Amino acid sequence: MSSSSGLLFPAREERATGNHTMSQLGITQALHFWASVVLVLGGVGLVGYFAWSALSDFPPGSTLAYGDRTVTGVTGSYCNYNSCVDVAFTEPPGETLRVPAGETLAFEYGGWATFGVEARAYPADPDGGTNYPTGELNLPVSRGSGIASLSADLPPERRYLLEVLVRAQSGSVSYLFQVETV
């Protein structure tokens, strides 16, 4: 063993003979390995935190009802305390709610104390498209605790996409429904 040997940085001769369990190269590799582990685990933790935060802030679902028929709305764009998500509406999947023109619909939006609810109807084209944003019809709304009453003051014998916007202290959200007046 040479006189320049040490526990952490053995002399060149000692590295070559392999008498030590840790070489200078081994220490560098170990430091890189543990730094990588710390960075990866920290990154996974941050991604998990933000993913959980985004999921927990997602707005509640909604339904639209007339009589004994209820349909579920498609959640559109929304903002919460710390972020916004933009969603381009397409025709919502599921059923069309058929309602006599001029009747009252019950819109339920559980979970948020609201500042306001607005409703707009967009006439649907025969080929399935809409006249968005032209042809917009604003609907009268009265609201209660978690439920708003929407008046279907729309021309009869037409299919509409009904957009409902809910504003609350925690943010805002839009929902989309298919409605057909009979």
Image (spheres, rainbow, N blue to C red):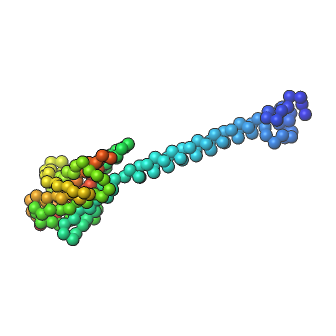
The quadrant in which the N terminus is found is top right
Q: Can the viewer see residue 177?
A: no
Work out which residue is located at the far top of the displayed protein and give it.
4
Q: What residue is shown at x 14% (from left), y 58% (from top)?
A: 151
Q: In this view, does 42 lie to the left or right of 79?
A: right
The quadrant in which the C terminus is found is bottom left
**In which image quadrant can residue 146 be found?**
bottom left
**In which image quadrant can residue 64 be found?**
bottom left
Q: Which of 172 and 93 is in front in this view?
A: 172
Q: In this view, does 31 lie to the left or right of 42?
A: right
Q: Can the viewer see residue 18?
A: yes
Q: Position of residue 159 (x, y in %)?
A: 16, 61
Tally the marks: 0
Q: In this view, does 90 lie to the left or right of 104?
A: right
**In which image quadrant can residue 43 be found?**
top right
Q: Where is residue 129 in the image (x, y as percent from the top left)?
A: 20, 55
Q: In this view, does 83 lie above or below 69?
A: above
Q: What residue is shown at x 41% (from left), y 49% (from top)?
A: 54
Q: Position of residue 101 (x, y in %)?
A: 10, 63
Q: What residue is shown at x 43% (from left), y 48% (from top)?
A: 53
Work out which residue is located at the far front of the displayed protein and give it.
145
Q: What residue is shown at x 18% (from left), y 48% (from top)?
A: 133
Work out which residue is located at the far right of the displayed protein and give it.
1
